[in-house]
Each structure stands twice: as C-alpha cells, then as structure tokens.
Image: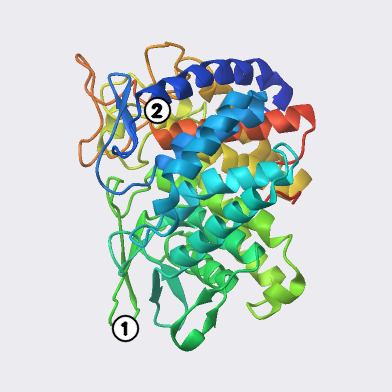
C-alpha cells in the first residue's frame, strides 16, 4: 500500500521537475536527430536507444507531443518549432487511420496540444493554422468513433485493433479525440446522412467500459475485487453479449495489468473534468449530468483506491498485481518498489499515468479528494528521482524501468539480470512530461492543464 506523505506540496517537487526538463530536452533532440522520415515509429529503448516494434503505430504522437510539452514547460522556442514541424509534416496519416483505437494518443498529443497552446495565447494566433488543427481534430474524433460495435442492450463501444469483439481499457483515454471533435461542433455522418453524436458515443463507451472492464467487489466472478481492471473485455459480435475478461499485456484475465489500471484512472478523471464544461442540454438526452458523473466517479474512485492499496509503499507498481513472481518477494507492498529484483519488473510508465489520474481526481473532488492528491504527489516524489529519471546523455529514454509487453517477451533484459529493467517507453516518457507539466502549473499558479484547454 502506498505510504501517503500528507506533508508533500507541489512546490516540494519543483527541483526534481526542473531536473527532469533539463534531461528531457537532450533526449528529445537526440531522438529527433536519429529519426528518419517514413521509418517505423520509436516505441521503446533497447540498450538506451529508441527502437521500433511493429504492432500498431500508436506512439508517434508521443514523440512530437513531447517536444510541445517541453516548449510548454520551458518556453524554449526550438521545441515548439520541432513539434509543430513534425506534426504538420509526418502525422497526417494518423488522422484517418481506421485501424487503431489510439487517436487520442497520436492526435490529441500533437494537433491537440498545438490547438490548446494557441487557445492559451502561448502560440501566436494564426487562423489558417487554427483551422488546420481543428480540421485534424474533427476528423480524428469521427474516425475513432466509427470503430463501433453494438452491445446487446443497444449501446456500444469503440473496439480495439484486435477486432470488433474486443474492448480495451486503454481506449478510455482515446475518448479525448471524440471530446475535442464534439467540442468543435463536429458529428460523424453515417448511412443516408445520419448524424451520429460523438458525445453519445463517448458516453456509451465510457458506460460500457465502467460496467465490464472495471470491477466493484459485487461478486461478478470469483476474483471480483473492487477497483480491479480487465485489460480486455470480450463480446459476442453476433448478438452483442458480453462473454468474458481477457488480457493482452497483463498476466491473466483475472489479474490487473497496472498500465491498463492507470489508463482507466486517468481516462475517467479527465472525462469528469470535460463533463463539467458541457452545457446541460448536451447531456439531457444521454441521461443527464448527475448520473453520468456518478458513473465516471465510481469507476475513477474504485480504480484509484485499488492502485493505492495494491502498489508498493512509494507508489511505483509492478507490471501486474497478479504476476506470479510476486509471491517470492515477501511483503513487497510494504516497501519501495525494487526495479532491480530477480522476480518481476516494475512499470514506471504505469506510475506516470496513474499519478496524473490520482492528482486529477483529487483536484476534482476538492477537500474530499485530499487522499488522492497526496497519493499522486507521493508517487511523483519517487518517480522523479533516482533510479527512475535517466540522467545519462547517451540514454535516449527519460523515464527508466518501463515495460511494454512482458508476456510476449519484447522487453530488453540486461546481461546479469533476470527481468527487464533500465529501459524506457514513448508513452512513459510522454506521460512523465505531461504529469510534470501538470504539477509545474500548480506550483506557478498557471492555468489548469486540460486537453480541452479550459478550467474544469
């Protein structure tokens, strides 16, 4: 269980965040120097160098989005120019990519950040540029929403790249693409010019995910622990009926892959913030603000509580809460995580994502959410320090000890080690930067950071 430090304040992390940005700058430039246009996207490091891994192209937005976050945090213009030039020159195919559930990762991290920075006055106003960003975001949300499988009760979900039967926990964070497209006044046009509400699809996907991917301790199966998350939920595409939990990157269907848990934590916390800026009339036809808020809040609180209870004392989780080697590690939840152990790897990327979820939920709940806010700061206090922040200039990764796909054996194991350690991932590095920026703005009383660019 996380040993929450209730005395921590955002300002206590200021020095660590400044150090993170210092090393971040060198790594962004190193990656860009080595990247070739048209080559496969950098995904994770091997011996400190970013390499590609074919599955789907879901990390390119993190590469260029990281440069935009670096500019946001430091005002160094070269990173704005780098992020903008690479987005305009290399990201167009992601806007209309019909084969993935990752539009929120690729396009909101790039076009969305540029649009937000312009809205905040951080980038000079340019109507043609604004129109370009907005068109990209409108199209991306509609394409994402078209990956649709109907469930037995008439609702539906955005299906994963595995096919129409598959709902991934990860996709809750790609709802940002639908949210921005709806905010910009867009709809998905269907057969016979049917207008399909992107907000409706966002809400239905959030409902189905909360119902089937998140457990609430109500005896749904023999392993129903409140806050547990199934990475994948399987449906019968013939009649839309739910069949069973599954896991692609976790240990088993009945264990919790911690990065999937973290996506849920952050995804619902962000959507709660978005829900609160919508006009009531937008939500009336979808059940109303209060029931939708309660649904999302229930999922967010359950998963954040589970993360707190099932992470080591410093808040850096192992890659799966049911990983078989954990039973050989004694009381591993009562002490700080050990990325150099001989049994199971930690996943620092889950910590970076989960910490932001804790902070956002804590902020959303105000005084009632103090536990979550302090837990988020506690995680970052460990994560933004040794041995997690990479300080070596010849290592292209920023956040060390990230894991990609443990079951497939894709992660590099250094000589003399028994499990993966010492490497980085694009999503881990991006979310370390995004969460650092979130806290930095709290320290300096800058505008609250949201993907939709408004105070929640």
- Whether residue 151 is visible here, answered yes or no, is yes
**Residue 229 place in picture, x, y as percent:** 42, 53
Report the residue marked by disc 1: 239
Report the residue marked by disc 2: 331
Give the foreground label among 2 and 1: 1
- Whether residue 450 is visible here, answered yes or no, is no
Mark pair 2, 1: CA separation:
45 Å
Q: Nearer the viewer, residue 181 or 275?
A: 181
Marks 2 and 1, the one that precedes in the sequence: 1
Q: In which quarter of the image is residue 423?
A: top left
**Residue 379 place in picture, x, y as percent:** 56, 29
Q: Quadrant of residue 342?
A: top left
Which type of secondary structure does the marked residue at label 1 adopt? loop
**Residue 319 place in picture, x, y as percent:** 36, 37
- Identify the residue at the far front of this view: 128
Q: Nearer the viewer, residue 455 or 183?
A: 183
User: On screen, 13 above or below 232?
Assistant: above
């Amino acid at each position: 269980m996380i040993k929450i430090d209730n005395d921590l304040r955002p300002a206590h992390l200021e020095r660590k965040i400044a150090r993170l940005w210092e090393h971040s700058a060198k790594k962004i430039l190193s990656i860009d120097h080595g990247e070739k246009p048209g080559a496969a996207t950098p995904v994770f490091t091997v011996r400190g160098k970013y390499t590609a891994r074919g599955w789907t192209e879901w990390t390119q937005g993190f590469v260029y989005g990281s440069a935009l976050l670096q500019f946001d945090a430091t005002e160094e213009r070269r990173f704005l120019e780098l992020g903008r030039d690479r987005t305009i020159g290399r990201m167009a195919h992601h806007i209309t990519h019909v084969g993935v559930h990752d539009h929120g990762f690729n396009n909101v991290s790039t076009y969305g950040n540029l649009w937000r920075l312009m809205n905040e006055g951080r980038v000079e106003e340019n109507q043609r540029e604004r129109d370009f960003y907005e068109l990209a975001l409108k199209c991306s949300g509609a394409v994402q929403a078209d990956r649709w499988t109907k469930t037995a009760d008439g609702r539906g979900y955005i299906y994963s790249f595995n096919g129409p039967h598959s709902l991934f926990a990860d996709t809750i964070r790609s709802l940002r693409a639908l949210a921005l497209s709806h905010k910009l006044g867009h709809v998905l046009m269907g057969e016979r010019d049917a207008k399909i509400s992107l907000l409706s699809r966002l809400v239905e996907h959030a409902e189905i995910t909360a119902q089937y991917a998140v457990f609430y301790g109500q005896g749904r199966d023999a392993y129903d622990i409140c806050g547990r998350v199934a990475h994948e939920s399987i449906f019968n595409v013939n009649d839309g009926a739910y069949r069973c939990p599954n896991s692609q990157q976790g240990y088993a269907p009945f264990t919790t892959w911690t990065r999937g848990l973290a996506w849920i934590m952050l995804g619902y916390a962000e959507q709660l913030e978005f829900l609160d800026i919508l006009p009531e009339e937008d939500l009336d036809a979808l059940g109303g603000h209060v029931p939708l808020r309660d649904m999302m809040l229930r999922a967010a609180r359950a998963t954040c509580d589970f993360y707190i209870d099932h992470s080591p004392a410093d808040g850096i989780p192992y890659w799966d809460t049911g990983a078989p080697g954990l039973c050989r590690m004694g009381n591993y939840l009562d002490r700080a995580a050990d990325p150099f152990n001989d049994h199971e790897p930690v996943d620092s990327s889950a910590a970076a994502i989960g910490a932001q979820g804790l902070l956002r939920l804590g902020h959303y709940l105000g005084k009632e959410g103090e536990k979550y806010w302090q837990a988020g700061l506690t995680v970052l206090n460990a994560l933004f320090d040794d041995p997690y922040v990479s300080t070596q200039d010849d290592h292209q990764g920023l956040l060390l000890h990230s894991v990609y796909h443990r079951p497939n054996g894709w992660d590099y194991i250094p000589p003399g080690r028994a499990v993966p350690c010492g490497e980085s991932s694009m999503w881990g590095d991006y979310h370390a930067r995004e969460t650092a920026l979130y806290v930095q703005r709290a320290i300096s009383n800058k505008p609250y950071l949201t993907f939709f660019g408004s105070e929640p």
